[in-house]
Image (cartoon, rainbow, N blue to C red):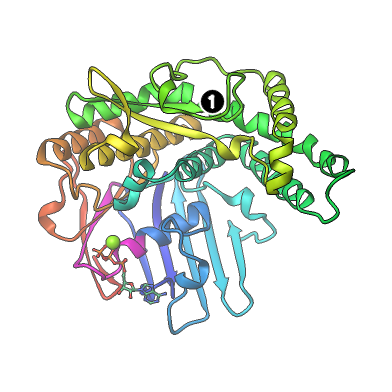
């Protein structure tokens, strides 16, 4: 896909402006705190309708305004004009695709086919399991039909079951009051587990190849540690070596449902005492490991800064490859100063990889012109100052 026009109104410090992007892409150069990340945040807002930095919609609205509005037109296999607006007085968000505003937000997701490479991505590897579950959830919601619906239903029933667990008067009869929520929970939980497993099986090899290419020889892997495993729920250090590899076949949903039902019964005493559901895919882990030749170690605990950074880049490249395959179109790469912190070998190999992987549009932000390093690309050069972009 190719982002052609972008209209901005009071999104962060970007003011009111209209931009026309070259199909090849552009490098946006500007000092710190001028609005580079804000620009990529605005573009990706049209893909996911939320901030990739985790900011609330209120924070995205210019300080002196009550309403922001962003509209973008994409060319490609499925041209579309996507717009989103937010009013902080009423806290209402409105999304339109091709001018039609009856659409549900979930039906408007993923129209750009964009991936953000951010300097904060290291957190994907260094952070706790919930960060990687979120990565999986976003990648799968945007690229697998049915995933988002299953996730929403799962979260709803999980909250209901937890609320039922906490109702007063526990004791006798509590099990019967909680059980009605388990049907939906088990069904959607098995579904999520299967889809996550399938994704890791399909893309784990790509991740390893991207990591190896950028690092120049080191290896790393991702493996899925579903909470719903017949052998036991927790991903412990001891089973890292014998972990479910990328090629593990996807278990069937019937078997997963049985495991889930058994696990809920097994954990009943504990769950009813604590008032939380302790089994299910909301406790999954997507393990990232680094292979030293002698040992396979969790990157989270043992990876160096550069290794984690490289693993995070490999995850984003894998996400981009998923879009390329799923939509049959080149993803738009939004690269926020991604070469920062990489040694020159790694940044050179990353640039080479980006050039060979695809020929899609790249929107790159850098603090200095000298940091624009994409061989084989003739990116336009824009400058940004105080939120104002000049071609
Ligand atoms: P760096 O190179 O340091 O990453 P950047 O160019 O990416 O900088 P941004 O994060 O895009 O910088 O923009 C930061 C600027 O945006 C800050 O000056 C901040 O005050 C301003 N800003 C953030 N939110 C809002 C808002 N809601 N309204 C107005 N300005 C905002
Ligand atoms: Mg920034």
Q: Nearer the viewer, residue 274 or 226?
A: 274
The quadrant of the image that shows the N terminus is top left
Q: Is residue 217 visible?
A: yes
Q: Is residue 53 above or below residue 92?
A: above
Magenta segment range?
A: 24-39
Q: Position of residue 260 (x, y in %)?
A: 69, 28
Q: Quadrant of ligand 1?
A: bottom left
Identify which residue is drawn at 59% across, 23% down: 229
Residue 281 sits in which quadrant?
top right
Q: Position of residue 275 (x, y in %)?
A: 70, 49
Residue 232 sits in which quadrant?
top right
Q: Position of residue 177 (x, y in %)?
A: 86, 44
Query: Is the CB of the residue bearing disc 1 within 8 angstroms of ligand 2?
Result: no
Would you say 283 lies left or right of 346 here?
Answer: right
Disc 1 target residue: 197
- Callout 1 environment at 10 Å: few (<14), some (14 to 19), or many (20+)? many
Q: Nearer the viewer, residue 215 or 103?
A: 215
Identify which residue is drawn at 37% across, 36% down: 315
């Amino acid at each position: 896909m190719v982002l052609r026009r972008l209209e901005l109104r009071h999104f962060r410090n970007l003011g009111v402006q209209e931009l026309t992007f070259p199909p090849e892409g552009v490098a946006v150069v500007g000092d710190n705190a001028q609005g580079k990340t804000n620009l990529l945040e605005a573009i990706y807002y049209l893909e996911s309708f939320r901030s990739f930095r985790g900011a609330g919609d209120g924070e995205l609205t210019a300080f002196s305004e009550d309403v922001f509005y962003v509209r973008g037109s994409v060319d490609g296999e499925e041209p579309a004009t996507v717009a989103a607006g937010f009013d902080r007085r009423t806290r209402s968000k409105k999304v339109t695709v091709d001018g039609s505003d009856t659409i549900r937000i979930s039906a408007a997701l993923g129209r750009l086919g964009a991936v953000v490479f951010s300097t904060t991505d290291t957190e994907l590897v260094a952070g706790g399991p919930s960060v990687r579950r979120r990565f999986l959830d976003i990648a799968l919601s945007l690229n697998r039909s049915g995933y988002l619906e299953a996730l929403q239903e799962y979260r709803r029933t999980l909250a209901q079951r937890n609320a039922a667990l906490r109702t007063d008067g526990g004791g006798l009869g509590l099990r019967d009051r909680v059980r009605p929520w388990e049907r939906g929970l088990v069904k959607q939980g098995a579904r999520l587990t299967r889809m996550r497993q399938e994704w890791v099986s399909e893309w784990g090899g790509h991740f390893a190849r991207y990591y190896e290419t950028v690092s120049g020889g080191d290896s790393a892997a991702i493996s899925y540690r579903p909470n719903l495993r017949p052998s036991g729920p927790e991903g412990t250090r001891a089973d890292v070596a014998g972990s479910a590899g990328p090629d593990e076949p996807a278990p069937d949903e019937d078997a997963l449902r049985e495991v889930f039902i058994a696990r809920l019964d097994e954990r009943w005493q504990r769950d009813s005492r604590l008032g939380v559901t302790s089994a299910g895919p909301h406790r999954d882990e997507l393990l990232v490991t680094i292979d030293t030749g002698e040992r396979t170690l969790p990157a989270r605990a043992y990876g160096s800064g550069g290794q984690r950074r490289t693993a995070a880049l490999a995850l984003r490249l894998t996400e981009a490859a998923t879009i390329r395959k799923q939509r049959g179109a080149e993803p738009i790469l939004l690269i926020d100063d991604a070469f920062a912190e990489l040694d020159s070998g790694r940044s050179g190999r990353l640039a080479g990889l980006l050039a060979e992987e695809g020929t899609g549009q790249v929107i790159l932000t850098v603090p200095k012109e000298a940091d624009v390093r994409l061989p084989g690309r003739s990116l336009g050069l824009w400058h940004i100052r105080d939120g104002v972009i000049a071609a």
